[in-house]
Amino acid sequence: MSKKGIILIADDDSAVLDTTSTLLELFGYSVIQSRNGLEAISKYKEYRPGLVFLDVKMPKMDGYRAFFEIKKEFPNAKIIFMTAHADYSEWQKAKSKNALELIEKPYSAEELKDLVERFYTEE
Amino acid sequence: MVILNEGKMSSLLSYKYYIRPTAHQLYGNKASKSKHHQNVHKSIKILALEGPMTTWEMAKIKFPTDNAKIRSKEKEYRRLLIGRIDKGRFSDGVMDLNLILIDSKSTKRNPGNRYRLSLFGILYCLDQMNFSEKEIDRIAKNYEIILPLVFGKWEFLKSIIGKHVYNISLLGKGLLFDNLNIISIKKDEFYELISYFGIKVNTLTESFNEQKIGEAISLWFYVTMLYFPSLMADRKSKRNEKILYKVLRKDQELQRWFLDFLSEAKNFYIQRSKKLEGISIV
């Protein structure tokens, strides 16, 4: 079945990865998963997704560092952060580099759908 | 009814946490370059697209008339499916993981086992083989008897929900909605339905037949694919009718089956709430 596009989601918690991926697939997108910031960068380069969801706290490389690395090479990348523990100082820096949103876990299916509809664009 | 190997194939959760990851480990993924992986994928693909058949019939697809070549290919397929223990060598076959099962005995001139994909074999190949929509239609036709509430209603479902039927391959990826605490979708009854589905699926660990697993796959399909997206769409479009209701209204068999599930879920929650009401601390 043809999909609306590709979304990348990076989170070290497989429960979050699974449930969010199920929702995004049901909304009609093809989902690429990664479990840390480093993997997210390499998958971004490989797939050029139209939207990225990055967890803030991840092993190997956290979401903020991955964000700045991706933005260095792809300034137009559309990136949303997900967190259970908001660190607003880092978020402010990321926001100044056009990070789209910071959503707190648990988020609702409606919130997720709304974000995708607002921000998804083809890379 | 096929009885499955105990402990290996008891529920959708065992597909997600045991069969799928083990199959990836043993047979690679669609990009794998290993000859063995490619041969396993080829045999699974033949059974998916052609339906139940003997290893002789599988071999004849590549060599329709050359008997010597058919014989050698047939042996290759047989070893792939059932494994080998001859001449001091030992290897598991695809059947050991319950992706492929013996369907029946062939009654043709050379009697032999007729093989087919198990339900988990079907999910695995929907995840791994990059099938086109036409090919998925063929699989649905070949396997309508073992998944009657979905594959048996395939053309009817397509006429109402269109290409969304092909989303059944999401289940092949193990996307079960079994971690609902992560997402707050608690305001809708979907939460109760899918949670009860999880409870029902977990209790299947005590039973090992494909009919019950087929029912679990069907419930997942109708609750997740038809009920949930409708709830999401209604808010935006203000359309009142859920897609699932349209389907159920037109098919009495599906309607009875789904209403049974609903009343089972209602009874479960009533009983549980009685347990809570019975708590007396002071």
Image (cartoon, rainbow, N blue to C red):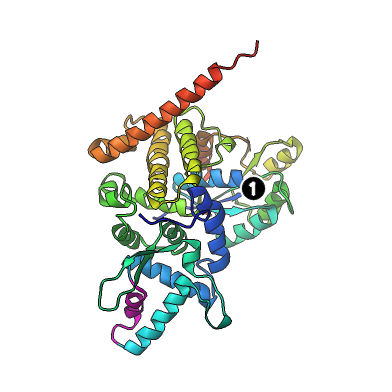
Looking at this rendering, what residue extends furthest in the right direction? A89
Residue at the image position 32 percent from the left and 87 percent from the top? B67
> Which residue was labeled with disc 1?
A11
Q: Chain of mark 1?
A: A
Is B64 within the magenta? yes
Q: Quadrant of residue B180?
A: top right
Viewer-nearest residue: B75 or B38: B75
Is B168 within the magenta? no
Quarter containing the N terminus of chain A: bottom left
Q: Quadrant of residue A47?
A: bottom right
Residue at the image position 51 percent from the left and 32 percent from the top? B185
Q: Quadrant of residue A45?
A: bottom right
Q: Residues within 10 Å of mark 1 (few under 14, many from 20)?
A: many
Count of numbered marks: 1
Give, as a single range, the part of the protein colored magenta. Answer: B54-65
- Above or below — where is A9 with respect to B186? below
Whole-percent x, y for residue A72 in the image: 69, 55
Whole-percent x, y for residue B109 in the image: 25, 78
Whole-percent x, y for residue B171 in the image: 46, 51
Left or right: A61 as drawn, with respect to B39:
right
Residue at the image position 69 percent from the left and 57 percent from the top? A38
- Above or below — where is B124 with respect to B218? below
Viewer-nearest residue: B75 or B28: B75
Whole-percent x, y for residue B72 in the image: 40, 85
**Disc 1 residue type?**
Asp
Residue at the image position 53 percent from the left and 63 percent from the top? B23
Quarter containing the C terminus of chain A: bottom right
Considering the numbered disc 1 on the image, is that residue within a helix, a strand or a loop?
loop
Main SS of the magenta segment? helix
